[in-house]
Amino acid sequence: MLEIEALSVDFGPRSAFSTHYDLTVPTGALCAVVGPSGGGKTTLLHAIAGFGRVVSGAVRFDGRDITGLPPAARPLSILFQEHNLFPHLDAAANVGLGIDPGLKLGAADRERISRALAEVDLAGFERRKPGELSGGQRQRVALARALVRDKPLMLLDEPFGALDPDLRADMIALVDHLRAHKRLTVLMSIHTPADVAGIADLVATVRDGRVTVAASA
């Protein structure tokens, strides 16, 4: 279970924006985070991931307080809207960064990479570079990189917003399949709630730095 309690993030003395997040996501659930642009969806995900400066409140996962942990030590992976692939590296190497940023990979690691690419329907694409892939395929590589980290919590920050509706639906269905298969807990911020209708277990509406509604889908 992911528990976010009275979480406040510091934006500096010149910012008028403030946050106070409260949210509980059951283990294995897919929670869609929706709301207007600038309302605080990305800030919430970044705070959970350890990228924001939390000044009060707590983030707990499976009963463990992870509020003070650095990002790399948290039991999660995060996927951004920009896939952040390195153009000079092939798909296998880009996925391999999720195992070792120095790409010191053994035979077992390379097998994990191939399995992760197969799980996102990119078997045989190991040697393709980002420039040789479509937008949807690049996001699948980024998703495979998140999967290969083998963490129980996955955060997705509007990762499919640039895709056309059909591709977006395919990617959301893939995430849902992987969530169920790997027993992941997933938070996905999204602009179009209709895309997760019938898929999300929970919908959290974020406005003005607060979760205003958290209801079963």
Image (cartoon, helix red, strand yellow):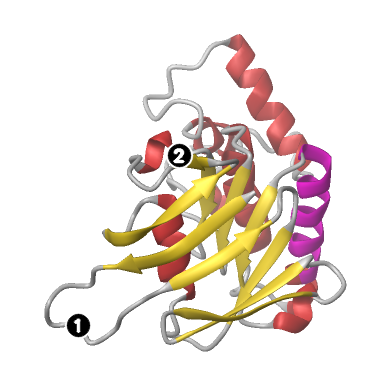
Would you identify the image quadrant in which residue 8 lies?
bottom left
User: Mark 1: few, some, or many residues within 10 Å (few <14, many ≥20)?
Assistant: few
**Kind of residue at badge 1:** Ser
* Residue beneath disc 1: 15
Q: Main secondary structure of the magenta part?
A: helix
Relative to 142, residue 211 above or below: below
Asked whether residue 136 is drawn in magenta, I would say: no
Q: Position of residue 191 (x, y in %)?
A: 61, 81
* Residue beneath disc 2: 74
- Res 1 visible: yes
Relative to 165, residue 146 above or below: above
N-terminal of the pair, mark 2 or mark 1, is: 1
Mark 2–mark 1 Cα distance, whole angstroms, equals 28 Å
User: Mark 2: few, some, or many residues within 10 Å (few <14, many ≥20)?
Assistant: some
Q: Quadrant of the C terminus?
A: bottom right
Q: Position of residue 85 (x, y in %)?
A: 47, 49
Bounds of the magenta span? 169-182
Relative to 205, residue 65 above or below: above
